[in-house]
Image (spheres, rainbow, N blue to C red):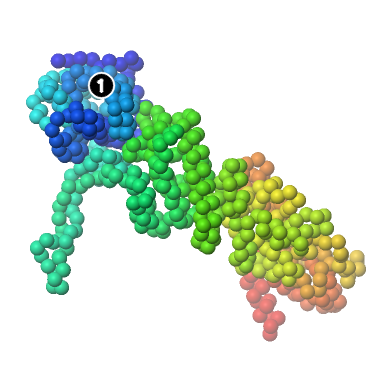
Amino acid sequence: MKGQINVKTENIFPVIKKFLYSDHEIFLREIVSNAVDASQKLKTLSSLGQVKGELGDLTIDVIVDKKAKTLKVIDRGIGMSKEEVEKYITQIAFSGAEEFLENFKGKSEAEANALIGHFGLGFFSSFMVSKQVEIFTKSYQDTPAVHWTCDGDTEYSIEDYDKKDRGTEIVMHISEDCEEFLEESKILSLLKKYCKFMPIPIRFGKEKVWVDSETEKDKDGNPKRVEKEQDRIINDTNPLWKRKPNELKDEDYNKFYHDLYPMNFEDPLFHIHLNVDYPFNLTGILYFPKVKRNIDPTLEKIQLYCNQVFVTDSVEGVVPQYMMLLRGVLDSPDIPLNVSRSYLQSDSNVKKISSHISKKVADKLEEISKNDREDFLKKWDDLKVFIEYGMLSDEKFYERMEKVYQLKNTDGEFFNFEDYKKKIEPLQTDKNKTLIYLYAKNTDEQYAYIKAAKDKGYDVLLMDGILDSHFINMLEQKFSGARFVRIDSDVINKIIEKDEKIPSKLSEEETKKIKELFEQNLDTKKFTTQTDSLEETTQPVTITQNEFMRRMKEMSEIGGGGMMGLYGDMPESYNLVINTNHPLIWDILQSNDIEHQKEVISQLKDLALLSHGLLKGEELDEFIKRSTKIIK
């Protein structure tokens, strides 16, 4: 018998072959998913007493025949009668799974919900890679087997067939331009990508494994390791996220993490096991990886599954942007997908799921910060990036993390916002009653600046994270009457300016002269010279950098539009601050030896540059030579 596929859109096959799915490789997931559906349906009917006898082995076989140029997917599931083939295959977009769910609603919903296909188009994805597709199928009911074939247009043939076993065999005759799908390695990689957690076993050829011999012993009397060939089963039908948390140990979670991300050799910090069945269905495991300075969420992604079928690792919309730093799996039949199951569509369920994930993550962070503070602080450097990203992105998350976030000072001590404010308020308030939060980015490079602050009894925070420039900006808006200033943005007397002033030992004319002498030996495009009357013990020359300009530049480098982009293009600029009260400055003015003046000025300038990490290349070489000469 011949017939015509019932479609309501002209030229449907070119659309299916080119546009229905974002990637041709998806066809294998769809065909195997249909085989899983058929097997799940059979198990459901059996549980309802509507299938007689034993179900037998339901393992699905995927077989490549490179010589015949075919790829087969064989299941031992529910099968189809001739009428069902004509109904479900020849009427595109009619969903057999949806009708099945409707028919059995209320009888065994838990099992019925395990059915994957909801679109009626999955089977036709096979034509993206095939010049001809055949179906050999026999229903679990007592009806003749059927052979259906189609060459990729709207005409098909269907006839009775001599098939004794229940189930369906899909034979795809691979097109010449798609022969990559006849390579065993290619099919194996696709099965591992899309099918490794499907709920019905999937067999793909044989594999060699090393096992202990049952008969042979080595010289020590231990069983010999021998190579054995066995069936290659692709998938774990009962993945970790489907199991009960009280049955699992940290070792189980860590092993699963490394199975998901085999190139990540470090254990995660901790995990969250999700299990929600109302008002939506969501299971999964989320991991906090060690990220510290790496905030690239594209390296390893959260994987999204629909009833154990891999859908995508582009989970934007389901997971808030800042939580893309997490790793793991999410599995939900309630996340709406388009016909190809490849793109997420926004709806109320997705928003609820996203909010729930945010809440569970915040709950976990609050829990470990309260119950095991010591362990929490050990992990702080890795958690900090994630928490800052969340607080910058989501006001609700900020409110949850206000008491969790830790400010760390250069002595390695930790404080929450409130406690740190109490600590610094007595001393670090300037003459305008502004509370000054001092911070450093690198304790080694900025040691001299930190020491100068500590000598005055001040405390200095360590803000060395990649997001800290953005985070500090936000905190300044949140903390009323406060300002964050990096320790090298000015001399400490100017950063926290008090009412008392230190008089200068130089006259106005002498101050002008010393400034001119330094400017003669300085790149005025990069450096601005200024004079200040500071304590005699303060360095004679100090390099500083304007807080606002430097922060804007840093923020632009890690992302920031508008004016920030303009600041990012501006060249680096620094201030060279001369302490007019230092004895060496007075000695320079008193000297009549012009060469000696130049040498001392160059040495003081280079020492200041060196302490700021700015002395490099030829200038560093000259400094070393000059230093050697002075020592001699």
Where residue 558 sits in the image (x, y, percent)? Answer: 58, 49
Which residue occupies the extreme bottom position in the image?
632
Q: Residue at 58% of width from left, 47% of height from top?
A: 400
Q: Residue at 46% of width from left, 32% of height from top?
A: 349
Q: Is residue 281 visible?
A: yes
Task: Please give the residue where the numbered disc 1 appears in the rendered image.
Answer: 88
Please tell me how crowded label 1 is: few (under 14), some (14-19), or many (20+) other residues with Cα within 10 Å.
some
The C terminus appears in which quarter of the rendering? bottom right
Where residue 359 sits in the image (x, y, percent)? Answer: 51, 43
Q: Is the residue 17 above or below the residue 523 in the image?
A: above
Q: Circle 1 — which element?
A: helix
Q: Nearer the viewer, residue 392 or 522?
A: 392
Q: Is the residue 222 above or below the residue 314 in the image?
A: below
Q: Is the residue 19 above or below the residue 433 in the image?
A: above
Where residue 452 sits in the image (x, y, percent)? Answer: 72, 69
Dividing the picture into quarters, in which one does residue 600 lie? bottom right
198 left or right of 404 in image: left
Q: Nearer the viewer, residue 552 or 100?
A: 100
Number of labels in the image equals 1
Q: Amino acid at mark 1?
A: Tyr
